[in-house]
Amino acid sequence: MENVKITELYDLSHTIAADYLRRFTYPWEALKGISDLIISLGQTLDPAEYDNPQENVWIHKTAKVFPSAYIGAPCIIGAETEVRHCAFIRGSALVGSGCVVGNSVELKNVIIFDNVQTPHYNYVGDSILGYRSHMGAGSITSNVKSDKTNVVIRSGNETIETGIKKIGAMLGDYVEVGCNSVLNPGTIIGSNSNIYPTSCVRGVVPAGSIWKNDGTVVRKV
């Protein structure tokens, strides 16, 4: 499955996690070490640029964090990012520059590239969101199968056994997810793809595609 490799999904020039991600072939392999990565990166950040309001939390001085937002450790919030009212960052969240973490959005164990928007009522857990990806209002990543077994990545007749129980979604660069969509565990969406609103998505969506409500996938013209 060449199309689900990190090198196919992401332009690594848009995240401070680039060197870390280069260690892996597939993005879900990076999930386990996000917490340690954040702590390691945080200790290298310039205190002239980043505030350190609590242990293992670093917030860029140009970021805007609303008073009602909760920021759990470890966490890095990049430059000019907005964390809006009642956002719930549970921890292990590496949020890039120019991002939006909106009202009532919950983040947990994620790498968020630069200029990503999760603006309204989103849950993003055990996931990686590529550069300029956008999750419409109410869209979520489901990160645990109902039978609690390990997540399997599926693309047609091909499968990859991950050996991991919790995997959300891996969104490539410039992915658009429509409102109130559910991305099932192990969903991989290739760059420059669109998901129709209210979709229930599973498996691998190739780059440059459109996923329609009935699960039909067509190439963009």
Image (spheres, helix red, strand yellow):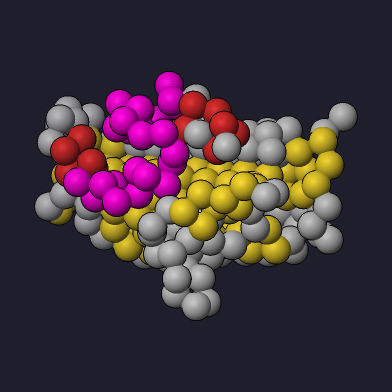
Residue that appears at 45% across and 57% down: 167
Residue that appears at 79% across and 57% down: 215
Residue that appears at 44% across and 74% down: 148
Relative horizontal placement of residue 181, taking residue 221 as reference (left or right)? left
Residue 172 at x, y = what percent?
57, 37
Residue 171 at x, y = what percent?
56, 43
Residue 143 at x, y = what percent?
48, 64
Q: Looking at the rendering, which quadrant does residue 111 occupy?
A: top left
Give the farthest residue toward the bottom: 147
Question: Tag count in the figure?
Answer: 0
Q: Is residue 24 magenta?
A: yes
Relative horizontal placement of residue 142, taking residue 60 as reference (left or right)? right
Residue 44 at x, y = what percent?
15, 30
Q: Is residue 152 magenta?
A: no
Query: Which region shows up in magenta?
Result: 12-36
Relative horizontal placement of residue 26, taking residue 34 as reference (left or right)? right
Relative horizontal placement of residue 42, taking residue 170 as reference (left or right)? left
Which quadrant of the figure contains the C terminus? top right
Which quadrant of the figure contains the N terminus? top right
Q: Mostly what secondary structure, the magenta segment?
A: helix
